[in-house]
Each structure stands twice: as C-alpha cells, then as structure tokens.
Image (spheres, helix red, strand yellow):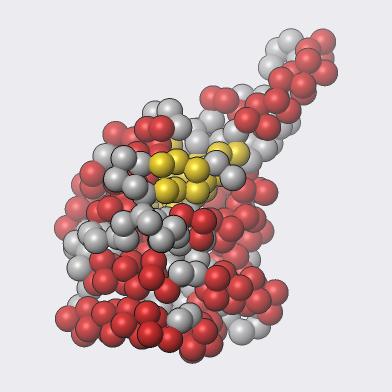
Amino acid sequence: MPTMHLSNGVQLAYDDHDHHAEQAEHAEHDKHAEHDKHGDRDEHGTHGRASRIPLVLVHGHPFNRSAWDAQVAGFAAERRVITFDLRGYGDSAVEEAPPIADFGDFARDLEALLDRLGVERCVVGGVSMGGQIVLDAYARFPHWMAGLLLSDTSAGAETPEGKVARNELADRLLAEGMRGYTDEVLHKMVASYNEEATERVRRMMLASSPRGAAAALRARAERPDYEAGLADVRVPVLVVVGRDDTYTPVAGARALSEALPDAWLCVVERAAHLPNVERPEEFNAAVRDWLAGIG
C-alpha cells in the first residue's frame, strides 16, 4: 500500500493504478506490433491509454477508497485511476496525524497528492462529501481539472440546523463509536433491496475511525457555499444520482446540473446514495460515455 507523508504529519494511503497497466500496455504493444501499424485497436484496448486523462476518485463519509473498487476494475485498463483514503479515514486514519480542522484541508491534501504523483491534468470525481471536496478543489486549483464527476452531492453551505446536527453527531461518534450510527443510516446510504452492496457499505462504515469521522463532520458543517461558483465552472461535469437517494434527491441533482454551464445528468435506477457501489455497471457505463467526450 503506497503512502504519502506530508510535512504536517498527515499520512495519505493511496492506490495509483498505473504501473501494472503500463507494463501490460508494453506487452500488448509488442504482441500486436505487426498487426497494428496503422493504430487500429479495440475501443477499450490498451492502445493510447497513456494519452487518456487520469481519473482521480474521492470517497465520501464515512467510507474509504475501497468504495471505488468497481470503478478501478472498470477503468484501470483504459486509463490511469487514482484512489486514496481521505485524512482520518481508512488507512489514512493514524493517531499521530493532525485531524481535519478546515474543510479545505481535504482539497489541499488532494493537491499535494496530485503534485507528488506528477499528475498535470485529470478528471476528478467524488460521491457525497467527496463531491463537495471536488467542488472545493476546483475552486482552489481549476487548472488541474479536465472534468468533474459529482455523484449524490450538493453545492450549498450547511444550514444552521445541519450544523447543529453534524456537531451533535460528531460528539456521539466519539462517545459511542460507529455501530449505532451505522445501523440507523445504512438504508439511507444504500437501498435495502441492494443486499450485497448493503453488507459492503456496512463493513466500511464500521471500520471507520470515530475520531476521523467526527473531525470531518465538524469541518463539513462549516464548509463554504459553492453554489455561487457553479456558473463559472469551465469544464464538463457529470452529475449522477440514485433514483432513491433521500440525502440528495433527484430534484437537487437536476438543479445542480442546470446551474452548471456544461453538465450531463444521469439518474441511476434502483440505487440510493451510493450508485457507484449499488449499481456499478450502470454507473460505469454513464461515466465511460461521458469520458469519451473528454479524452
């Protein structure tokens, strides 16, 4: 498991799905050298993979980078795919590291990771809180972004009632751990009819660090309002939402897409808040179609 250590003590665990695919590309190139003199290759083959824009994926709360396993499986043969655990989550939850104090810390961590990995331009996607981190990152370093994938997320600032609720939940997680919260919200995260996905998400939630999750909740309560900047987004955006998402309903996703100058909206049927986990084939198909117009 690769790990990046920042100067402030933060440790970010990540997976850069690039090296092995490059080896496969070279082997495939040698194998087909005599039959590929004109560059004719399968649409999803390895030819041209190095020229395709990398895909960087940001998980939500309270999950980890394994939430994107189906997208790694679906896209790593076609382009470089980078996933990582946010500060305080998954393998990035280390006791000696400073917790998130400001919501912008997440985007600054992402910026440091992209710089360390030598990524000059990429498509960045996020689900739920991850989508808000993507919007925060675009506001800070838009030159790195070739496109945004926003799944089951919202752009507005937290309401006064929401701030109170997030801080109260943070206190509760520190006092009680993750189990009670997980049991209460699991079927809002994942539709109950998606049984296999439900068990995967349950395991991720229970494995999350209460300390990291609580810090993120407090920071997220004070996040900026990104709605005013939506009209200034100058890259293509794919907005995805599960049909049965009650956290960020379809109407909100439609309003988000309409506020963006160049956006597609995809509603994934038979999914709630995590369509990338619940309906990965449908989710990946929509992302692939959209990416075809970016590169």
**Does the rendering let one see residue 176?**
yes
| Above/below status of 190 relative to 240 | below
Q: Residue at x 42, y 74 (%)?
A: 210
Q: Residue at x 25, y 54 (%)?
A: 104
Residue 227, position as x, y percentages in the image: 21, 61
| Above/below status of 17 relative to 98 | above
Quadrant of the snapshot with the N terminus: top right
Residue 209, position as x, y percentages in the image: 46, 69
**Does the rendering let one see residue 264?**
no
Q: Residue at x 63, y 61 (%)?
A: 280
Residue 286, position as x, y percentages in the image: 56, 54
Count of numbered labels shown in the rendering: 0
Question: Residue 234: which quarter of the image?
Answer: top left
In the visual, does 107 lie left or right of 210?
A: left
In the visual, does 35 lie left or right of 168?
A: right
Q: Residue at x 33, y 67 (%)?
A: 216
Of all residues, the one furthest to the front in this rendering is: 96
Residue 35, position as x, y percentages in the image: 81, 14
In the visual, does 189 lie left or right of 143?
A: right
In the foreground, 167 or 22: 167
In the foreground, 159 or 93: 93
Question: Residue 207: which quarter of the image?
Answer: bottom right
